[in-house]
Image (cartoon, rainbow, N blue to C red):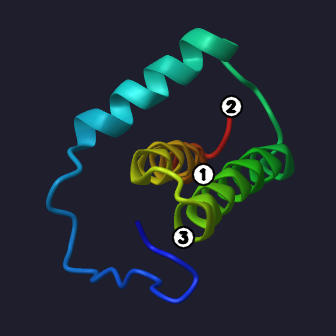
Amino acid sequence: MPTKNAVPRWVDDRLQHLSPQVLYDESRRQVEKWGIQRRTPFEWMCYLTEEVGELAEAISEMVYRGGRPEAVEREGIHAATVALKIAEMSMQGGE
């Protein structure tokens, strides 16, 4: 496990292992959990900020406290899904 003195280095070499289906499934899970959400762009930004905060926490836990990389993956997918929903709603111009 990484320690404070051995922070892992990750290389950005395009999306290779994350399929669009993963994001679609997460979006469907979110709708099943929370229902259809009709919010302002600012409210959506708050949701995204909360998800990014959870991602930051998962990374911190992994790097400094022996947390699991799976938590980083899960929170990254949550944040990406909300970000893509925001982009799609913007493209559609709202209701």
Instruction: Find the distance from the CA under tag 1 to the CA under tag 3.
Output: 35 Å
Q: Residues within 10 Å of mark 2 (few under 14, many from 20)?
A: few
Res. 63 mark: 3
Specify whether 77 is left or right of 63: left
- Label 1, secondary structure: give it: helix
Res. 47 mark: none
Mark 2 vs mark 1: give the one in front.
Answer: 1
The type of residue carrying mark 1 is Ser
The type of residue carrying mark 3 is Val
Location of residue 92 in the rendering, given as x and y in whole percent from the top left corner: 54, 43
* Above or below: residue 44 compared with residue 21: below
- Label 2, secondary structure: give it: loop
Say whether disc 2 or disc 3 marks the residue closer to the N-terminus.
3
Instruction: Find the distance from the CA under tag 2 to the CA under tag 3.
Output: 42 Å
- Label 3, secondary structure: give it: helix
Mark 1 vs mark 3: give the one in front.
Answer: 3
At x 82%, y 50%, the residue is 46
Q: Mark 2 highlights which residue?
A: 95
At x 24%, y 34%, the residue is 21
* Above or below: residue 89 compared with residue 32: below
Q: Residues within 10 Å of mark 1 (few under 14, many from 20)?
A: few
Location of residue 86 in the rendering, given as x and y in whole percent from the top left corner: 60, 49
Q: Mark 1 highlights which residue?
A: 90
* Above or below: residue 26 compared with residue 11: above
Mark 2 vs mark 3: give the one in front.
Answer: 3
At x 76%, y 49%, the residue is 50
The type of residue carrying mark 2 is Glu
Q: Are marks 2 and 1 in contact (CB under 8 Å)?
A: no
Instruction: Find the distance from the CA under tag 2 to the CA under tag 1.
Output: 10 Å
Say whether disc 2 or disc 1 marks the residue closer to the N-terminus.
1
For the view shown, which residue lies furthest in the left direction? Answer: 16
